[in-house]
Image (cartoon, helix red, strand yellow):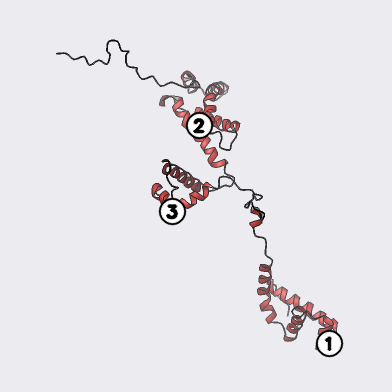
Amino acid sequence: MLIDKSTSRPGLPDAPTAAPRRRHDDAPDTATLFARLTTLEPGPERDAVRDELVTAWLPMAHRIAGRFRERGESLEDLRQVAALGLVKAVDRFDPERGAFESYAVPTITGEVKRHFRDRMWALRVPRRVQELRNKVRVARRELTQTPGTPEPTPADLAAHTGLTEEEVNAGLEALESYSALSLDAELSTGDDGYSLADTLGGSDSSYDVVVDRESVKAGLRRLPERERAILYMRFFEDMTQSRIADQLGISQMHVSRLISRSCARVRAEALGERVAV
């Protein structure tokens, strides 16, 4: 007995067949032009064929650029970057290796992604940190695909990516570093609101005083006892030169000369200069 295994049945329409993959409207047939390009030597004729190919495929480059809109870069700039990737694809394409579209799409996409990676950071960060950022971003998205899933911890991200927790933390910090925060940004919305600039420290002159004091200690110890006493009375007890002169039984002019000579000697030794004996 023969059994009809056909899927067609009387009174029923034939089963639909899979539709062939549709080519994009911006994927022209330029095989002839590429074949001609490979036979031409550098010169005006080759440049004209190259320009014709770039013009023909430019709508595809613009379509790829459109995928990256709403990411902080203008569409016109993205189209310029995509056009640069298209030119690179035309120059490097080998017609014997397949269809141009299969080669051009990843080349142009890679050029646009490279633009975001290298040019869109407000602060220049090492390539290694950028890669950690991308790995952490993808891992966090994969771990939170199910609704209601809690935010993954650094340990969860490290287990998912194979990174160390230290590397994960660096990637998490980089996620917040894609753009810079203005110093005028308000950090508090209350009555006592303050900006980021208000939290920055200022120069502390006390550090310079400490350095100066430590620098002159040795020179002060080498001064004669009377000169040390005069400097102490003048600069630590805030005595006038006339009062110092009365206490030591010398003239005020002599006190002034001793102070000037002692300060010059200590200063010279602190600066490493040779003092004349």
Q: Amino acid at mark 2?
A: Ile
As drawn, the residue found furthest toward the front would be 191
Q: Residue at x 83, y 85 (%)?
A: 245
Q: Amino acid at mark 1?
A: Asp
Q: Please state if 83 lies on the left or on the right of 132 as rendered.
A: right
From the image, tell me which residue sits under label 3: 165
Residue 120 sits in quarter: top right
Q: Give the label, 2 or 3, closer to the camera.
A: 3
As drawn, the residue found furthest toward the bottom would be 249
Q: Amino acid at mark 3?
A: Glu
Return the disc, 2 or 3, that comes first in the chain's sequence.
2
Q: Position of residue 258 (x, y in %)?
A: 79, 81
Q: CA distance from mark 2 to mark 3?
A: 34 Å
- Disc 3 vs disc 1: Cβ atoms closer than 8 Å? no
Q: Residues within 10 Å of mark 3 (few under 14, many from 20)?
A: some
From the image, tell me which residue sits under label 2: 108
| Quadrant that contains the N terminus | top left
Q: Give the label, 3 or 1, closer to the camera.
A: 3
From the image, tell me which residue sits under label 1: 246
Q: CA distance from mark 1 to mark 2?
A: 90 Å
Q: Position of residue 13 (x, y in %)?
A: 32, 13
